[in-house]
Structure formats: C-alpha cells, structure tokens
Amino acid sequence: MEKYCAIGKNQLRHNAWLHILVCAAMLLFSPLVLGIQNLDQVQSAKVLETYVALIGIILFTPVFLPEQNRDLRDLITSKYTRITEIYCIRILLSLTAAVLMVATYMTVMKSGRCEMEFGKYYFGTMAEIIAFGGLGVFAYGLSDNLIIGYMAPLVYYAAAIGMGAKYLKKFYPFGMISDFQTKYWLLAAGIILMAAGVIIRYKKS
Amino acid sequence: MSKNTEIVIRHLDKYYGKKQALTDVNLTIHKGMFGLLGRNGAGKTTLMKVLATLHEKQGGEVSICGIPVEHASAIRKITGYLPQDFSMYPNMSVYEAMDYLGVLSGLTKEERRKRIPGLLRQVNLQDNYRTKVKALSGGMKRRLGIAQAILHNPRVLIVDEPTAGLDPEERVRFRNLLCEIAQERIVILSTHIVGDIEATCENIAVLDDGRILFQGTVEELLHMVESKVYKAEISKKELPELKQKYIVTSMLALGNNVMVRFIAEKQPFAGASLCEAGVEDAYMYLMQGRGEGTCS
Amino acid sequence: MFLRLFQKECAQVGKSLIYWLYVVCLVVFFSSQMGSMKDNMLQPPERGQDNYQAYGFKEDVTEQDLMRKALGELAWGYYYGSFTTYPVGYAKDVRLSESEQEEVGRIINETTGIEPDKIEEHLAAYFEKHDVTTEPYLIEPKKGLTYEAFLNEMEKVTDMLGPGSSFTEESLKSETRLSLDYEGAVKAYENLTDKDGYTGGYTRLFCDYMGIMAGILPIFVVATRMLRDRRAQMQDLIYARRASSAVIITSRFAAMTVMMMAPIIILSLVPTVDSMIFTKGSQISLDYLAFLKYDFGWLLPTVLAVTAVGMFFTELTDTALGVLVQAAWWFISLQIGVAGIYGGQYGWNLIPRHNTEMNYSGFKEGFTQLAMNRAFYTLLAAALIAATIWIYEKKRKGHLKRRGKILRNRKKPTQA
C-alpha cells in the first residue's frame, strides 16, 4: 500500500499537478464567460456536458507521458513493480481529481439555484469524462503520440457538435436530456477504451 | 580550402545564469586532431557548443579560420558538429536523413547525390541506404553522425564524446575514421576517456572546472610525469597508506597482494620500480595536482 | 534553399500518420455534412409552398420591428430582475445592482414612455391579448424616438450587462428573423443564381463547415511536426547547419499550410461539381472558380493562424501546450459563432459562420468586416511566425532552453 501511495504522491508532485491545475483554472474561471446560476435543466446539462466534461481530456490523456522517453520506459519496465500498476494508480488519481472537481462545481451550481437532478447529472457528467479520457488514453497508447491522444477525444467532441446524435447514436456525448441511456454506453466504452489503452501500451513496452 | 585553418580562442568566458562555465579560456588549434580532455561537467560540451555557434559567449574572442564566431551563418558553413546525444527522425531511412540534413546545409541536389554515397561508404554504411534510423545500432548511428557532420565538407569538425557507449571494436574503428578525416581539416574531439586521446591526438588541452589546465602536445603532457611513475607489489594492508601518500593510477589484485601503479616525485621505497609513463598517469597527476577527485 | 527544404518538409508531413488522420477527419466530416448535398440542392421556389424556410429570412426587418422587440425584452428583464446574456454561447444570468436597475428603469421610460412601476400592468395587458408561449413581448417605442437615440440607450444597457448582451445592433438583427414570402424567396433564389453564380453559395456553405475543422485539426499536425525534432533528439544537428532560422521556420510553415490546404481544396471541388451536375441544362451561369476564391479567401487565413499558433507555442514551450491553447480558442470561437450562424455577422471570429447557401445579401453586407477579419488573421499568423523565428534563433544560440544539461542536472531525480 505504501508503495502505491508513494507512486501516487510522486505522480501528483511531478506530473499530475499541472493538469489538475489547468482543469481547476478552467472551472474556476468559467463563471466569467458562462452562467452557473439560475439555469434551467437544459442549460445546466449543457454547461456540464459541453464544458465541464472537457476536463476528462486534460486529466486522463497524458497518463503515459512521464515515460515518453524510450530508455526511461525500459528502465521503469525493468523494475519489480509492474508498469500497468503505475498506470492504474495514475488513472485512479485522475479519477479522484475529476470526482472531486465535478462534485464541487455542481454543488456551486446547485447553490446558485440551477435546476438539475444532482445524482443523475453527476453520473452523466462523470460517464462522459471517462469516455473522453478513455478515448484519449486509448489513442495515446495505440499511437505512442500524446498529440494523437488529445486529437481523438477533441475530434469526437467536434463530431458530436457538428454531426449530432443522428450519426453518433448511442455514443452521442450530449444526451443528458434527450437520451440518458447514452451515458451508460459512454461509461462502458470509456472503461473498455481506458483498459485497452493501458494493455496496448503494456504489450508494446 | 583557404590557408587559414586555425581556431583561435582568447579570454573566452561563458556563464549559465550566475554559474561560470568557462573562465578565461585561451587556445590555438591547428589542422589535425585536437583532443579536449576533462572530467564530466568540466565545460567541454560548452566550449564545443560555443565553437559550433550553439551557445553565445559572454566575453573574449573566438575565431574559426579567421571568421569571428559571432558570424553564425558563415561559421556554420565551414563547421560540422556531432553532439554527444543525438539521433535523427526514426522513420527516415539513412539516405533520407542525410539528404534532409544536406538540404539544411545548403547543398544542391547534384552535390547531395554525389557526396552522400561516398560518405556512407567511408563510414561503412553503404549497405544501409534504406535502413530506418530507428533500426541502427549505437555504433552505426555514431558513424552516420560523423557522415552527416562532414556532409558539406567542413573545414572544422567538432565531435563531442563520440566513443561513449561504443564497444571496444567500434571504438577503435571510430577513432581511425576520425584520424582519416583529420588529414585535411581540424577535428576537435572531446572525451573523458584518456585512451581515445592517447590513440589519436597529437595536440591536447585539459579542461577542469571551466579553465584550461594544460595545453600542448601529448609528449609535453607525458614529460610532466617522466621518471615519476612506479609500480610495486604490496600487501593489501599497506594499500590505504600508499593511497594517502601517492597518486595511484591503477591496481591489480594478486592473491593477498596488490600490484599498484602510482606516481611519486622520487623513489618511494625499495621495492618500487620505475616504469614508462602513460597519458593516463599524466592526466591523473595533472588532475590530482589541483587536489580534486579522479577522472572517471 | 527554401524551395528544396519546402519539398522535404512537404514529404515529411505527407509521410506522417497524423497528417492522414487529419485527412480522414476532414473527409468524414465533409461527407457527414455535405455528402448528400447533391440530392438536396435548392430548386427555384414555387408559389403556394408550405413555407419558404429553405430560402432564408426576410432581409428588410424594419428599425421599428427591431426596437419593439428590444424594448419588450428589456422591460421583461427589468420586471423579473434578471437578464440572460450569451458571452460564449452559454446562457449567463446577469443581475444588475440597484443603481443599474434604476438606470434601466429610466431608459425604459425614456424609450417607451412607460413608468417603471407600470410595467407589470403593461405586461399583463399584453399577454391578455397574446399567447405567452409563442409570442414575444413587444413594446411600441415612444413617438419621436429615433433609431440612433434608441441604439445609444441600448449601448448603455450593453455596458451594464457585459459581453454577450442581446441589446447590441448585431445581436438584435440576428434575433429578429422573419419568414420569407414567395416574392422574397424568388428574390433570394435569384441572388443565388445570378449574383452568387450558384457555386458561390454552396462553396460558402462548404467554408462554414470546413472552417470548424480548419480551426482545430491543423494544430495536431503542427504540434507533432514541431515536437518531432526534440523527440528525435535532432535539434542540435539542425541548429548547427547553415540554413537560417527564417528559412527553416518559414519553409515548415509553408509546407504545413500547403499540405493542410490540399485536401480542403480537393474537397471543395465536390460542391462545385455537384452544382454543375445539378444546374446542367439550365440558364444559370456558374462561377466555376468560386471554390478557389473561397478556399483562399475564407479558409486559408484560418489554417494560417492555427498553424502559426501551433508553431509558436510548441517552439516556445517544447510541449503540447499549443494544442490546449488552440482547443480553447476553437471552443470559444465555435460558441461565439453560434449567434451569427446564419451568416453576415462575421465579426472578428476565427471561424466565421455562414451556415446556409443563401443569405447572399448578408454576405455582401458583412463582406468588408469579413475581409478585415481574414486580413487580421493572416497578419496575426505572420506576426506569430516572426516571433517563432525569433524564438528559434534564440534557442539555436543556447537561450530559452528548459531542458539543457544544467537545468536537467539541477532537477530532482524523479522516480516513477
């Protein structure tokens, strides 16, 4: 256990802090440009789905970045602790950060008299975050290129805005109001993609 | 080639922030192989990067073949540089990588087509035109590095720690290659491996903590320890005392005894016999003379 | 040297995986949005159609219409004590301070003649006659109120509400849309066939869709290319060569722009060819080169700007920061653009919107603004490239390096 704590602490201190900081800033400064008070159900869903969920891309995608250097990756892989365990701890850390940030943000919205079913919206937003993150992790793992890792979820996001539910069907990321079932699909896809990304990376190293 | 094949460095100073990396460096380097020796962090790479226009100096004057180093573009035309850590785009083939760098050196298509095959032959990569850079071994990559550095036929070749990480055979082959190249130009070679210098360079400079500690020929360096290198077989118990008194340059365990090679100003004790000095002995003598650690 | 390097750079981009991902994304997006266009091209309007929505909206909205709608909205917000603004496409609830609220009351009185405490009565009376669920709240402006004086007062309201207020002239115009009748539809269709050369309208629609992609996708190709030198440990080898920083950076910039524009230009032929097939045998004289005008005039500046942003931030930080910056900019542009999606209101948006093959008159009206907008982004790209050259030159001489040996040694050892 102590080992895992040390890995997590190290990740937080050397890598994750920057990504968490960017996300926190994104959420903190959001009231400057978008309202988080007195929104109706649709508006609240829009803020959560199309804005807050973007933190998934920033938080999860760079999971393999610390070992981008090939030699360093070999060095870490040669250690007793399996590299997949390290990846999993990083993912858990990102997940914890997302869980806390979204909860805080939604509490602020709720106290600003925004209409929403807290539990439902929370689940929906987290499912989308995991889907975005999963797609990023998968693309990064597959291509060994962080930029492609960012590209995949961003293109998915752009496709959702541009093409809508007609093309994406059950994988339409903004279905909080129109079709909540999509959220279960997103969550499942996100988890599978994330696991696949880690496994692919492990097999490659 | 113009007659002036000479590098002149006068009172060179270089800082990284507040840390002074080079202090009042004075050197004159002529045609042929020139070795720059010093421990890790002595300032060798910094000096080489100043010569290759990759670092700006803060004080003093440096000119290469009569051109002040401030004229980066003119300098780059006549210098070739092989950094310590380098690679090339992994997905390019050996030929493509050379061709790309050739374009950056301003060579025309005709010139590239003429020169690249010859150079690859010279560095023994003629069978690897289409090999991807990522598939090359360490030694092959180094050789490709040399080929790219002399692609535009520079008058000065600057090579930073070229033999690090090479196996003994590759290292010998690489040194010979450099000697061949040095017949018509200046080759500056930096290393912390004394053997490299001993085998290839006539003129050397020793750099320590950003200052020139020694400059001259290998003979002059050897002269410093002439009649000062001894060897003796002593018991292991005596070793600590001997180490304290003298500069030990090598030792070999023989059962309970040790055969030591060390430097002493005069005959230290009866059993010690004088032997022929090597560059390594001289280097150790020089470095210890400053009262600091040993060379790696 | 520039040309030779340019060729090499083009080849490098062409061989990279990410470039082909870029092309695939463009093609997929294009076919999802415009793939079935040839089956949906616009026929001339016929008398007695159910509606003429496909032909756009009325252009001649009167100033009176505009004032009525704005004043109604103002009074509504005043009465309920809250206004909705859309700074970046998201609804934002703005509540005014007591003194500002008083000021709005004064403005309402000034422009409508209604006392602030009589608004409730007016509102109730209005919705006794009109259906509150379908009809907007309209108030007649005070007699003698000039349009200029009205705009003047609305500007004060906008100052209080902040960005995204619906009381700016552009916003009022875009929100006050009235349906076309048959005559209007005929006129709009004639604009498309006569003034726009038919292809013009469709190419503009193409630019609208492709602008969305051009505002984000190039950044991935650019960031990957710019990071490749460091990743391949090739920086020093390139730094030490004769080629000047300006030649290295501009050849890369030119190569990436050309490679990025190539699939866009090819795709833009599709609407042109579709138009040719569709109008075969008719009297319409097509503008065959519209696609080139639009590709270069409309989309190229976006590609230039995004490429320059990517090069600048990647060179400056040696990280993927450029992706984050561009993603944020793209996101904001897209959200802001929604308000002017019908075209004609291009503002300074990186991604000007014009989501219809119609509205030629809006295009014409907004043309100067669009031209300035596009010129601005071209200049911005040039400035960023100049800055990138400067940074590259500095790094080449050993400055601005974050990962030099010295700093690396100073850093604490990292354990995984």
Image (cartoon, coloured by chain):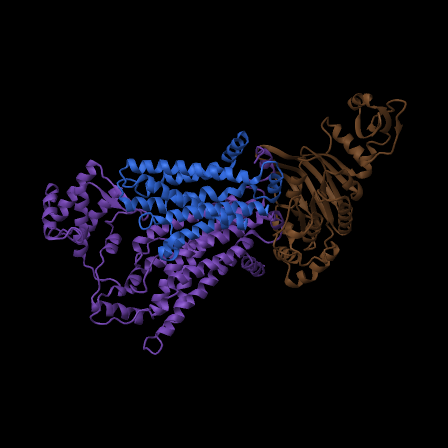
Chain colours: A blue, B brown, C purple
The image quarter containing residue B284 is top right
Provide residue C411's location: percent of width, then percent of height: 57, 34
* Location of residue B143 in the rendering, given as x and y in whole percent from the top left corner: 71, 51
Residue A54 in picture, x, y percent from top left: 40, 45
Residue situated in front as seen by the camera: B143 or B46: B143
Tell which residue pokes out farthest to the bottom in this image: C281
Residue C322 shows in the view: no
Left or right: where C3 falls relative to B295: left
In the picture provided, is C235 more to the left or to the right than B272?
A: left
Whether residue C180 is visible here, answered yes or no, is yes
Q: Quick check: B186 above or below B224?
A: below
Count of labels in the image? 0
Q: Percent from the top left, x then y, of residue C347? A: 33, 54
Residue at x 89% of width, y 28% of height:
B273
Q: Which residue is pictured at 67% across the width and 62% down the height?
A: B113
Name the residue at 32% across, 77% down. C282
In front of the other: C311 or C28: C28
Location of residue B40 by image quarter: top right
Q: Quadrant of the C terminus of chain C?
A: top right
Residue A89 vs residue B254, the one in the foreground: A89
Q: Quadrant of the N terminus of chain C?
A: bottom right
Tell which of A159 and B33 is nearer to you. Answer: A159
Q: Is C39 positioned to the left or the right of A78 in the image?
A: left
